[in-house]
Amino acid sequence: MSHKNWRTGTPNSKKRRIEEVAYLYFAGWSKEEIATEADYSIRTIERDIAYIETHREEFLS
């Protein structure tokens, strides 16, 4: 199965992806569930979650 490439896309598309991941992450979804829903690799989702955890206040306001 092929996943979307996290390196491509506009800054807005990356921001939207991270916002979607944050929403699902805070809703209690697992990394595997998020990767399947968003069609990105688990590694990309792990990077996004690491960013989200580092900037948690940005997503919980």
Image: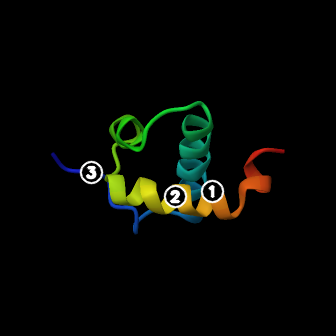
Residue at figure coordinates x 43%, y 53% from the top left: 45
Are the two marked residues, 2 and 1, in contact with CB atoms closer than 8 angstroms?
yes
Q: Residue at x 55, y 62 (%)?
A: 50
Which badge, 2 or 3, comes first in the chain's sequence?
3
- Residue 27: horizontal and vertical position, in percent? 60, 30
Q: Quadrant of the C terminus?
A: top right
* Residue type pointed to by label 3: His
Badge 1 marks a residue whose secondary structure is helix
Disc 2 from disc 3: Cα separation:
15 Å
**Residues packed near mark 1 inside 10 Å, few (<14), some (14 to 19) or many (20 plus):** many
Q: Which residue is mark 1?
A: 52
- Is disc 2 placed on a helix, strand or loop? helix
Residue 24, by quadrant, is top right
At 43% from the left edge and 37% from the top edge, which residue is drawn?
30
Whole-Å distance between the Cαs marked 2 and 1? 6 Å
Secondary structure of residue under mark 3 = loop
Residue located beneath label 3 in the image:
3
Amino acid residing under circle 1: Ile
